[in-house]
C-alpha cells in the first residue's frame, strides 16, 4: 500500500515535466497554475490518513453538556471550528468562525473576542446596494483574517418563508433575486481577504422550531424557482469556497445526505467546484452522506457519533464508499483553499481598526434603515423647531440591540446593558455601545432631550405630552434555536399607544429581527425600521432622524397586518420529541409579497417600500430584447428639494398567468441624485425571472407570449405597464 502511494505521488510530481512545465518538486506552490491543477498535485502527495483527517472537523470551543471534550490546542479559542492541516505538505489548518454580521465568539468561550458588528444581514439587504454588501463583507473578512481565521461561516441566504423564524435577521429576505445578488456580493467581499466564505443553510432552513426533525416538503420545480434560485445566484456571483448543508430534511432526505440536492444539482448541474460542509450536528450517516455529496463533517462531537474519519475509512474498505469519493472530498477542499489564496497568503494576526470598521457598519445602517411612515412636518427633526424631546424605551440611553445565537458579535468593552436574560444559549442578549440618546443630544444642540425607560406607560405619556416630540425605541430580540412571536414583547404596543395619544409628534424606531405587528401604525406620526443597526447604530439612527442622512432603505420583506396573512402555517401542534414531522410549504415559490399578491391580501407595508425626505419619479421602461439579452431602461428623476437615493424596482408579469404569483421582481437600479437631477438606468433581466422550471427536462422554459413590465417604488407602487411579446425559449442549469 505504502509503495503504491509513493509511486502515485512520484507520478503526480513528474507530470509537470511531461507537460513541459518547470522541473520543480513543489509545483503546487506555483500561483500561475490553476486551483484545480494545484489541488491535484497536493492530493497525489497525500496519504489516506491525511485525507481522512481533512474531511472531519472539531469544535474549537468548550462544548456545553460535554465536559470531557476540549478544543484542540491549535484552534482559535472561542471559535466555531478547526480542521487540522498537513504540515509536511504546507497545507494550513482551517480556522473557522461564525461571522454573519461580524467575527463571533461562542457562548461557552472563557473570554470574548471583541469585534465590530455590521447591521443584521436583513438590514444590509434593505439597502438594495451591492456595494454596501460587498464593503460589509470585506470589513468582517478583514477582521476575521486579523484574528487568525481563514474560513467564515457566513453567507446566510434562506428565504423568509416563516416570518417568526428566529434567524431571519441573518438571512436575505423573501425574494430570490434580491437575496442572491446581495448575499453574493457579501460573499465576494469576504473572500477578497484571501479567506473562504460559505453560503448557507442549504436548503429550506426556514424555521427554528424542531429544525432537526422537520421534513420540508415542496414541489421540486417551485423549490428551483425560489430558495434554490437564491442559492444559485449567490454562488454565481460570490463564488463561495464552501456550501453548508442544513439541519432539516428536504422532501424525505436529510439536507446533508440529500443526493438530488448535493450531488445531482449542486455539483453536477451547477458544476459547483467547492466543498460541502455540514452544519454543526447535521450529519446522520457515513455511507449515505458521503455518497450523496457531503465532503466534510463539521465539529463531529455535535453529531450522535463521528461519521467520517475512522467510520469513513471502514466504509471505503468495505466497498460501500468508493475510494475516489474520498479523493473528490479532499480535492474540493484543496481547490477552494487555492482559489481563495489560503496557501499563497498565510494568516498574520494583527490588531483590527475599530474606528474604520465602525464607519463601514454605520454606513450600512444608514443605507439599510427604512422610513416606513412619515406624516407631514414630523421628520426630519430640526433643532430650530424643537425645545424638548423625550426618548423612551429600548435602552436607547445605552446602545442598540443585536441578534443572538451563534452569530453574536461581542463588542469592544462588552454589552452596554448587562445581565439581560437569557444569559445562556442562545444568549447572552447584547446591546452594542452606540447610544441613540447620546447621538441625538450631539446632533440637536440646544434641545432638551429627556430619557425614560418606558416601563411605566402612564409616566411616558405624561412626559410625551410635555415635549414637542416623543421617540419610542421598540425592540424585539430574536436568536438561533427559537422562533419569535410577531407581537412586540413586554407590552410595548401599549406603551406606543399611550405615547401616540399624548405626544404632539410621535415617532417609533424599531430595532427588530424582522417583521413585527404594528396595531398602532396609523396612530403614530413616523416609523423608522432600523433593524439591528450594528456598531454605529446609535449615530446612524440619530443622523436619519435629524436629516443629516436621507433615508433610502427599502423593505426586503413584506410587513403583514396580522400573523396569518401571506403564508401557510408550518405546523398545527408540537410533534413528539425527536420524531420527524412534515412542514408543507404549500405556497411553493410564492414567498412573501408573491403570496400576498396571489391571495389579494393588503400588507401593512409592501415589499420594496421605503420613504425618503425627497421625491422621485420613474419613467415607463423601454424594453430591449436582442442577442445581448433582455434589458429595461428607465429615467429616474429627483423631483424634490434635497439629494437622495432612489431604488427603481422593475417587476414583470406574464400576461395570462401561469406563474406562482401575479408578478416577480426582475431587477432594480439604485441611484443617488441631487435635487432636480435625472439619470438613466438600465436593468439587465436574468432570463430565469421570465421562466418556469420544467423538472421533466431539467430546463428553464420561457413560454411564448406577452410579458408586462412596470417600474416603481415598491411591489404595490408601480408605474404604467409596458408589454413585450417574447418568443419561446429553453435553457439549462
Image (cartoon, rainbow, N blue to C red):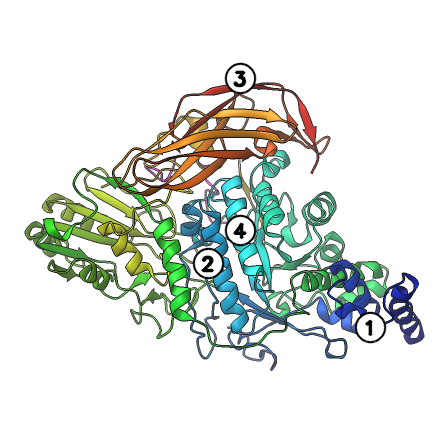
Residue position for label 4:
185
Tell me, yes or no, whether the two marked residues, 4 and 2, touch with CB atoms within 8 Å.
Answer: no
Q: Quadrant of the N terminus?
A: bottom right
Tell me the tag on residue 47.
Answer: 1
Per the model, the C-alpha gap separating discs 4 and 3 is: 35 Å
Magenta span: chief secondary structure: loop
Residue 638 counted in the magenta span: no
Secondary structure at numbered mark 1: loop
Residue 465 visible to an observer of this rendering:
yes
Residue 106 placement (x, y as % from top left): 48, 70
Q: Looking at the image, is mark 4 or mark 1 nearer the viewer?
A: 4
Residue 321 placement (x, y as % from top left): 81, 58
Specify whether 515 is left or right of 281. left
Residue position for label 3:
656
Within 10 Å of disc 2 (Cα), the crowding (few <14, some 14-19, many 20+) is: many
Q: Earlier in the sequence, mark 4 or mark 3?
A: 4
Image point 20% across, 38% down: which residue?
Answer: 375
Residue 310 visible to an observer of this rendering:
no
Image point 63% across, 37% down: which residue?
Answer: 220
Per the model, the C-alpha gap separating discs 4 and 1 is: 37 Å
Per the model, the C-alpha gap separating discs 1 and 2 is: 39 Å
Residue position for label 2:
480
Q: 522 above or below 540?
A: above
Per the model, the C-alpha gap separating discs 4 and 2 is: 24 Å
Tell me, yes or no, whether the two marked residues, 4 and 3, touch with CB atoms within 8 Å.
Answer: no
Q: Which residues are magenta?
A: 559-575
Residue 436 placement (x, y as % from top left): 25, 60
Q: Earlier in the sequence, mark 3 or mark 1?
A: 1
Amino acid at each position: 500500500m505504502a509503495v503504491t502511494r509513493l509511486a502515485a505521488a512520484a507520478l503526480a510530481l513528474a507530470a509537470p515535466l511531461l507537460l513541459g512545465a518547470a522541473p520543480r518538486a513543489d509545483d503546487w506552490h506555483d500561483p500561475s497554475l490553476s486551483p484545480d491543477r494545484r489541488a491535484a498535485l497536493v492530493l497525489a502527495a497525500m496519504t489516506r490518513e491525511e485525507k481522512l483527517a481533512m474531511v472531519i472537523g472539531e469544535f474549537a470551543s468548550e462544548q456545553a453538556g460535554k465536559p470531557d471534550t476540549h478544543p484542540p490546542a491549535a484552534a482559535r479559542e472561542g471559535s466555531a471550528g478547526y480542521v487540522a492541516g498537513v504540515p509536511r505538505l504546507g497545507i494550513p489548518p482551517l480556522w473557522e468562525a461564525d461571522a454573519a454580521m461580524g467575527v463571533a465568539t461562542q457562548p461557552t468561550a472563557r473570554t470574548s473576542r471583541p469585534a465590530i458588528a455590521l447591521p443584521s444581514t436583513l438590514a444590509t439587504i434593505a439597502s438594495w446596494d451591492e456595494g454596501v454588501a460587498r464593503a460589509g463583507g470585506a470589513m468582517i473578512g478583514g477582521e476575521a483574517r486579523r484574528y487568525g481565521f481563514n474560513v467564515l461561516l457566513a453567507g446566510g441566504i434562506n428565504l423568509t418563508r416563516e416570518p417568526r423564524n428566529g434567524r431571519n435577521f441573518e438571512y436575505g429576505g423573501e425574494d430570490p433575486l434580491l437575496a442572491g445578488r446581495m448575499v453574493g456580493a457579501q460573499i465576494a467581499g469576504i473572500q477578497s481577504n484571501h479567506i473562504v466564505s460559505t453560503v448557507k443553510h442549504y436548503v429550506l432552513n426556514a424555521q427554528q422550531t424542531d429544525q432537526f426533525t422537520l421534513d420540508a416538503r415542496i414541489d421540486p420545480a417551485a423549490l428551483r424557482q425560489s430558495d434554490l434560485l437564491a442559492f444559485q445566484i449567490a454562488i454565481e456571483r460570490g463564488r463561495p469556497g464552501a456550501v453548508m448543508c442544513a439541519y432539516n430534511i428536504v422532501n424525505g432526505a436529510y439536507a446533508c445526505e440529500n443526493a438530488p440536492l448535493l450531488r445531482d444539482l449542486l455539483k453536477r448541474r451547477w458544476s459547483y467546484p467547492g466543498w460541502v460542509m455540514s452544519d454543526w450536528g447535521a450529519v446522520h450517516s457515513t455511507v449515505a452522506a458521503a455518497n450523496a455529496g457531503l465532503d466534510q463533517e463539521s465539529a463531529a462531537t455535535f453529531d450522535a457519533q463521528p461519521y467520517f474519519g475512522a467510520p469513513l475509512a471502514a466504509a471505503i474498505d468495505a466497498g460501500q464508499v468508493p475510494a475516489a469519493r474520498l479523493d473528490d472530498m479532499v480535492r474540493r477542499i484543496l481547490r477552494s483553499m487555492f482559489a481563495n489564496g489560503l496557501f499563497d497568503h498565510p494568516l498574520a494576526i494583527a490588531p483590527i481598526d475599530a474606528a474604520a470598521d465602525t464607519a463601514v457598519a454605520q454606513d450600512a445602517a444608514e443605507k439599510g434603515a427604512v422610513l416606513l411612515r412619515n406624516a407631514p412636518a414630523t421628520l426630519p427633526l430640526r433643532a430650530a423647531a424643537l425645545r424638548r424631546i423625550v426618548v423612551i424605551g429600548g435602552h436607547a440611553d445605552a446602545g442598540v440591540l443585536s441578534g443572538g445565537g451563534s452569530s453574536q458579535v461581542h463588542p469592544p468593552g462588552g454589552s452596554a446593558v448587562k445581565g439581560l436574560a437569557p444569559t445562556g444559549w442562545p444568549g447572552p442578549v447584547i446591546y452594542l455601545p452606540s447610544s441613540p440618546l447620546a447621538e441625538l443630544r450631539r446632533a440637536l444642540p440646544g434641545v432638551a432631550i429627556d430619557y425614560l425607560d418606558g416601563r411605566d406607560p402612564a409616566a411616558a405619556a405624561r412626559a410625551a405630552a410635555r415635549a414637542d416630540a416623543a421617540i419610542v425605541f421598540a425592540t424585539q430580540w430574536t436568536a438561533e434555536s427559537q422562533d419569535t412571536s410577531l407581537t412586540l414583547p413586554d407590552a410595548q404596543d401599549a406603551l406606543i399607544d399611550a405615547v401616540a395619544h399624548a405626544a404632539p409628534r410621535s415617532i417609533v424606531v424599531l430595532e427588530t429581527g424582522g417583521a413585527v405587528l404594528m396595531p398602532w401604525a396609523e396612530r403614530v406620526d413616523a416609523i423608522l425600521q432600523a433593524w439591528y443597526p450594528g456598531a454605529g447604530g446609535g449615530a446612524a439612527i440619530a443622523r436619519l432622524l435629524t436629516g443629516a442622512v436621507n433615508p433610502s432603505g427599502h423593505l426586503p420583506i413584506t410587513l403583514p397586518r396580522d400573523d396569518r396573512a401571506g403564508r401557510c402555517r408550518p405546523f398545527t401542534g408540537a410533534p413528539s420529541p425527536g420524531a420527524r414531522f412534515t412542514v408543507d410549504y404549500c405556497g411553493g415559490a410564492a414567498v412573501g409579497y408573491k403570496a400576498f399578491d396571489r391571495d389579494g391580501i393588503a400588507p401593512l407595508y409592501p415589499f420594496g417600500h421605503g420613504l425618503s425626505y425627497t421625491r422621485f419619479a420613474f419613467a415607463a421602461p423601454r424594453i430591449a430584447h436582442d442577442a445581448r439579452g433582455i434589458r429595461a431602461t428607465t429615467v429616474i428623476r429627483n423631483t424634490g428639494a434635497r439629494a437622495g437615493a432612489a431604488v427603481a424596482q422593475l417587476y414583470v408579469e406574464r400576461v395570462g398567468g401561469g406563474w406562482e404569483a401575479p408578478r416577480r421582481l426582475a431587477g432594480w437600479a439604485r441611484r443617488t441624485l441631487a435635487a432636480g437631477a435625472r439619470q438613466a438606468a438600465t436593468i439587465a433581466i436574468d432570463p430565469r425571472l421570465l421562466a418556469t422550471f420544467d423538472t421533466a427536462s431539467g430546463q428553464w422554459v420561457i413560454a411564448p407570449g406577452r410579458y408586462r413590465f412596470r417600474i416603481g417604488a415598491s411591489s404595490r407602487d408601480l408605474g404604467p405597464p409596458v408589454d413585450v411579446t417574447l418568443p419561446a425559449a429553453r435553457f439549462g442549469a
